[in-house]
Amino acid sequence: MKSGTTHSLTEEPADKAAKRGHAMALLEFNLLNYRLEVAFGIFGSIIFSVLLIFINKHLVQTYSFTAMATLTGWHVSFTWIMIFSSIRIGLVEYKAIPYRVAAAYSCGNAVAMALQNLSLAQNSISTYQVSKLLIIPATIIINVCRGDSFPRPAIILSLFILLLGIGLATVNDVEMRLSGGIIACLSVVATACVTTYTHLIQKMYNISSNQFLASYLSTQAIIMLIFGPAFDRSFSGKNPYTEFDWSYPSVQTIGSSCFVAVGVNVFACFLLGKTSAVAFQVVGHLKTIIILSGGYLFFDHDTSMKVVAGGCVAMGTQRAVIPFC
């Protein structure tokens, strides 16, 4: 009996060690899988977002198309059609969230888009860029007010250096009127709230990014298709449907913009579901640096040592910041 008891006691620690090793291996595998998914999301978000910016820039410069709110409505509508088609053929499983949540999110997202366009229209480019820099601090404040812990000092310092670099690269002469300043502040708060709740809703209802898009895009499309043209007409005085010089090449460019926008929307939602609103904004600033570089290489934009230095500082802190956001 004594020898049998001793034998069972020696087997028990070995069994526990084996289980512990298996658990650690599974944890490492899940961590690696998560990192690969985040890297895939960052890569896809950057590629599609930068490509969309360049297509839209070509659309504006070549065909004098300025109805950006209307174009956004087309982007949202086309993305919903593609997601709905994916559901119909079984590529995406539909999982509904409460309609009041989807409707509230759609309205908030539409307001954030409208405020961003208004901020760009009412302020200088530099002021608009400053407002974009303030989204990360606003997002941190919102998360802390919700009960999240305040980021570590090292992360705050890295974010400060990142924003300083982006500021050097994008901000020149800041001009601000009272009305423009108020709109810019509202735009910052609305954008920070929307990106935060994009992450929270996916976690709260345990849905994928595509399922989340399927839940709210139909309502978002209706809002944008109704109010987008009116918004554009209030600024340009032209109806984007009847007073634009339509041609086959311009339709091709708009179609390309809509196709690429599907990737932008899918990867943005995917990345926000996998990481956080702060990490998403950090990736957004990386896109800004790439767009500035592309403008210099392909669109003959002027640059300076200040822009180059700011871009280098920002790029140097990206790797340090993203894993901890």
Image (cartoon, rainbow, N blue to C red):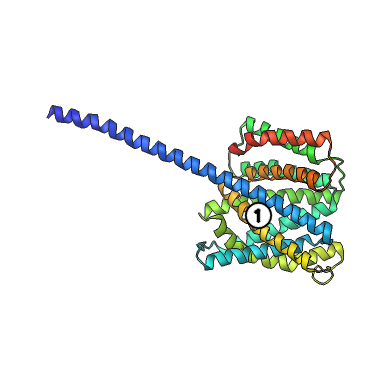
Q: Which residue is drawn at 84% across and 70% down?
A: 243
Q: Could you tell me which quadrant the C terminus lies in?
A: top right
Report whether residue 290 is seen: yes
Q: Which of 291 and 232 is in front in this view?
A: 291
Q: What residue type is labelled 1?
A: Val
| Residue 35 location, quadrant | top right
207 relative to 306 in the view: left or right: left
Q: Could you tell me which quadrant the N terminus lies in?
A: top left
State the image coordinates of residue 48 (x, y, percent, origin top left). Answer: 67, 52
State the image coordinates of residue 210 (x, y, percent, origin top left). Answer: 56, 58
288 relative to 18 in the view: left or right: right
State the image coordinates of residue 263 (x, y, percent, origin top left). Answer: 63, 56
Q: Residue at x 63, y 42 (%)?
A: 279
Q: Residue at x 62, y 64 (%)?
A: 80
273 relative to 187 in the view: left or right: left
Report whether residue 108 is seen: no
Tell how many labels. Answer: 1
Q: Which residue is drawn at 66% across and 65% down?
A: 78
Q: Residues within 10 Å of mark 1 (few under 14, many from 20)?
A: many
| Element marked by disc 1 | helix
Q: For the view shown, which residue lies furthest in the left direction?
A: 1
The residue where tag 1 is placed is 264
Q: Which of 21 and 135 is in front in this view?
A: 21
Query: From the viewer's perspective, is residue 51 above or below residue 324?
Result: below
